[in-house]
Image (cartoon, rainbow, N blue to C red):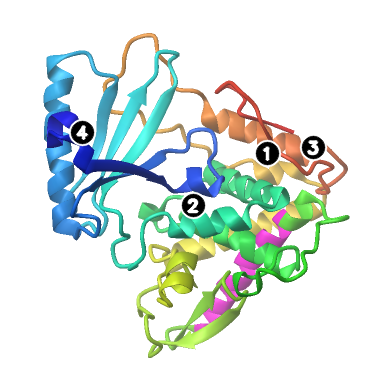
Amino acid sequence: LEWTFGDCRSISLMCFGSRIQNTHLEGSDVDVAIVAQGQESADSAEQRGALRKVEKVLRQWQTARSCRFALKESRTFVSIKVPILVLQYWATNGYCIELDVTAGREDTGASVPKGVTDSIIGEFLRDPFAADLARLVKIFAKLHRKNQAQSGHFNALSWVCLSIFALQRMQLLPVWNDWNADRHPPEGVQLGDAFLAVLDLVVELSEMVAEAGDSAQVKISVADGSISTVGLDTEGVIQNHTLIIEEPGPAIHAAKLCNCARSLRGVELNLIADLCRRTAAGLRTGDVSCLEPKDPTPPKPTTAKKPKKLKKPPSKDVARAVLHSAAQSAAGFRWGVTRLVPRSGHDAPWRW
């Protein structure tokens, strides 16, 4: 940043995303925003300009000297809504950290600062049971490759909101609009029960979307705990969206409707619902093999240059082991464990 902008005193960095939500997993990237003084609410053009400056300096720096940062991908083209740089940092112990670098403090199109939604999600997930469910759901989606927004799936934030909404329907979490209400601790409720509730919720939403057709859209909100069908003439509703999962930050702080699942496609929703339906049926009969992907494909090789003798930790193998240890720890789908405990070392980041 000093090589790019000169005086770093006018530049600040802020972290947001899953690290603030406390839902990050092994291999989760770090979301960082570059905020220049006077450009806190920079538009997309100003963001692209700032990121292209960083990209240019980084490319020169990589060729001129030994640099542990590698530019993996540049998404600064004009048509993209939120321009980002995808960087990789290779630590001395061989651990690779991926960073998504954006510019500006304000979310594009949301009219709220970055990190507001993450702070609200983090408040929901202060409950350890809720945080464990959100991580478990994210692991499940990651193993089955159903967490890529660019492929038309639910993104990570959507899966987390679905987890929170399922707990609200089970009356294990309050809605945000009634946050001071009496809490219901999950006594007698296993993590597997809550996981099944998330799977059933996805199936139900798929059926509601099919029933609504092209005349209306289905919307869920963790702010008020509602699930409803809204007309296409409702303010903020975009007609080509498959399903609306209300983003908590804009809804609570700006009374604005923003959709977490704006990249979700109808075909992919049906495929995800079929996966959830099969998995739920298998778990209810004690068949834990339904958790394993049927057609696992090897991860795509990275194009970024990396130092010799450094290996990226096997995050998918770790996630698979975590998911199976959960399923096999007790009879049937009723998992006898309720906590994921942080543990040092990238080879086994979570233990039961």
Q: Which mark sits nearer the N-terminus, 1 or 2?
A: 2
Mark 1 to mark 2 CA distance (whole Å) = 17 Å
The overriding secondary structure of the stretch rendered in magenta is helix
Q: Which mark sits nearer the N-terminus, 3 or 4?
A: 4
Q: Amino acid at mark 4?
A: Leu
Image quarter of the N terminus: top left
Q: Are marks 1 and 2 in contact (CB under 8 Å)?
A: no
The residue lying toward the viewer, choosing from 349 and 216, is 349
Q: Nearer the viewer, mark 1 or mark 2?
A: 2
Image quarter of the C terminus: top right
Q: Which contiguous range is marked in magenta?
A: 195-212
- Any part of residue 79 in sight: no
Q: Amino acid at mark 3?
A: Gln
Residue labelled with disc 2: 156
Mark 3 to mark 4 CA distance (whole Å) = 48 Å
The secondary element bearing badge 3 is classed as loop
Check residue 1 in the rendering and tell me which mark sits there, or answer none.
4
Q: Amino acid at mark 1?
A: Leu
Q: Position of residue 299 (x, y in %)?
A: 43, 33
Residue labelled with disc 1: 323
- Any part of residue 328 in sight: yes
When asked about the image quadrant of residue 171, the answer is: bottom right
Residue displayed at 46% across by 32% down: 298
Residue displayed at 62% across by 74% down: 225
Q: Amino acid at mark 2?
A: Ala
Q: Position of residue 93 (x, y in %)?
A: 45, 13
The secondary element bearing badge 2 is classed as helix
Check residue 328 in the rendering and tell me which mark sits there, or answer none.
3
Neighbourhood count class around disc 3 (C-alpha, 10 Å): few under 14, some 14–19, many 20 upward: some
Decide whether residue 196 is among the magenta residues: yes
Decide whether residue 203 is among the magenta residues: yes
The residue lying toward the viewer, choosing from 186 and 122, is 122
